[in-house]
Amino acid sequence: DGGITQSPKYLFRKEGQNVTLSCEQNLNHDAMYWYRQDPGQGLRLIYYSQIVNDFQKGDIAEGYSVSREKKESFPLTVTSAQKNPTAFYLCASSIYPGTGNTGELFFGEGSRLTVL
Amino acid sequence: QQPVQSPQAVILREGEDAVINCSSSKALYSVHWYRQKHGEAPVFLMILLKGGEQKGHEKISASFNEKKQQSSLYLTASQLSYSGTYFCGTRTGSGNTGKLIFGQGTTLQVKP
């Protein structure tokens, strides 16, 4: 079955440690996104990538880094520079949006990161 | 800039109607609507494109006022399964590309 797989589902981290969240898709989608979800703040865009080897910052990129070396993979690293990393992280993908398609996002099940 | 949704929360009885609004300070090319149930990933409901085209997967309706940079989602004869948090997402600029920015969400609770 095609879909988006995020791992791990739950992650605990000590302050000062970097952690990498995995996101893999087998939908052959061009675009991939990372969002952070906090209660009452909706989904906030961290980074997005529309093509391999290229990505752009979203609204809250500080303290995060990404790579897009393969079409199907878009890992997110939460660095120690991120001051408040405890949150729910959602990865999504879409066909490259353009004329004739909706560019709807397909989401993974999410990764919940807790900093101890 | 994040679009603004209103209201923040709605409580309904089965069979009642609801309207969720989404407004942006920027010119919009498209507006997406998603629903997220507790503990699950958001699921696409509908997209409204500049020029009036509308595409969706469920029997819900929405409007898109390009001049006012606003969209509204209409949930009629609500069912228990409609409960969840609704998000609008907007793409600005001249095309349906680039980043998709979401509002803060509207929580809908449908009671028997």
Image: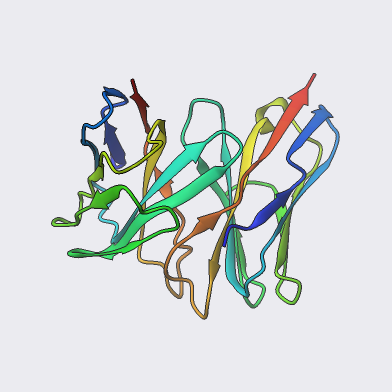
What residue lies at 67% left-to-right and 30% top-to-bottom? B83
Rendering coords of residue B91 (x, y %): 53, 66
Rendering coords of residue B95 (x, y %): 49, 77
Residue B71 to residue B83: above or below: below
Asked if residue A104 shows in the view, the reply is yes
What residue lies at 45% left-to-right and 67% top-to-bottom? A101
Rendering coords of residue A73 (x, y %): 20, 49
Asked if residue A24 shows in the view, the reply is no
User: Between B71 and A62, which is closer to the camera in this rendering?
Assistant: A62
In the image: residue A101, left or right of residue A8 = right
Residue A6 to residue A12: above or below: below
What residue lies at 77% left-to-right and 44% top-to-bottom? B7
Q: How many labels were placed on the picture? A: 0
In the image: residue B88, left or right of residue A49 = right
Residue A27 to residue B28: above or below: above
**Where, quadrant-wise, is the C terminus of chain B in this rendering?**
top right
User: Between B25 and A25, which is closer to the camera in this rendering?
Assistant: B25
User: Between B84 and A81, which is closer to the camera in this rendering?
Assistant: A81
Res A57 quadrant in image: bottom left
**Where, quadrant-wise, is the N terminus of chain B in this rendering?**
bottom right
Rendering coords of residue B60 (x, y %): 70, 48
Res A13 quadrant in image: top left
Q: Residue furthest left?
A: A69
What residue lies at 55% left-to-right and 26% top-to-bottom? B38
Q: Residue furthest bottom?
A: B94
Picture colour scheme: rainbow
In the image: residue B108, left or right of residue A98 = right
